Image: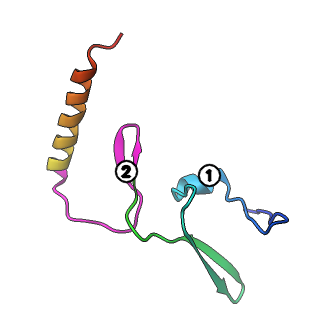
């Protein structure tokens, strides 16, 4: 994939790459100089949770112990409560 450096020294990361690696404004990147070029990669300091279509998605390298069944059941109960509070769809 080819990109161009603008007159201010900036590189635009193509949207498909930003989406694939969950890069958003303010994401810290690590730049490494290698013998044959440079390598740029996301610098994950903390796990990143993002809500997509009402569900929290983890986009970080760290993992935690989690009772998945309990988590899913609690999330479903919370969504059911929200739906009841909203009332019937019009």
Q: Is residue 15 above or below residue 62?
A: above
| Residue nearest the observer in this picture, 61 or 10 | 10
Closer to the N terminus: mark 1 or mark 2? 1
Q: Point out the residue furthest to the top here.
A: 90
Question: Quadrant location of residue 12?
Answer: bottom right
| Residue nearest the observer in this picture, 6 or 62 | 6
Mark 2 Cα-neighbour bin, 10 Å: few <14, some 14–19, many ≥20? few
Q: Is residue 65 magenta?
A: yes
Are the residues flagged by discs 1 and 2 in contact, CB closer than 8 Å?
Answer: no
13 sits to left or right of 6: left
**Which mark is nearer the camera, 1 or 2?**
2
Q: Which mark is residue 57?
A: 2
Q: Which mark is residue 16?
A: 1
Residue found at x 16% / y 56%: 67
Image coordinates for residue 70, horizontal then vertical, percent: 14, 48
Residue span colored magenta: 50-69
| Residue nearest the observer in this picture, 3 or 81 | 81
Q: Is residue 15 magenta?
A: no
Count the labels in the image: 2
Residue found at x 26% / y 16%: 87
Q: Which mark is residue 33?
A: none
Residue found at x 73% / y 64%: 11
Q: Point out the residue furthest to the right here.
A: 7
Question: Quadrant location of residue 27?
Answer: bottom right
Which quarter of the image is occupied by the C terminus?
top left
Image coordinates for residue 6, horizontal then vertical, percent: 82, 63
């Amino acid at each position: 994939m080819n990109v161009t450096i603008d007159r201010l020294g900036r590189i635009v990361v193509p949207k498909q790459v930003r989406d694939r690696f969950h890069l958003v404004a303010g994401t810290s990147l690590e730049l490494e100089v290698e013998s044959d070029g440079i390598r740029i990669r996301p610098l994950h300091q903390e796990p990143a949770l993002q809500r997509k279509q009402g569900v929290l998605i983890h986009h970080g390298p760290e993992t935690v112990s989690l009772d998945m069944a309990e988590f899913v059941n609690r999330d479903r109960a919370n969504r059911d409560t929200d739906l009841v509070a909203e009332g019937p769809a019009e």
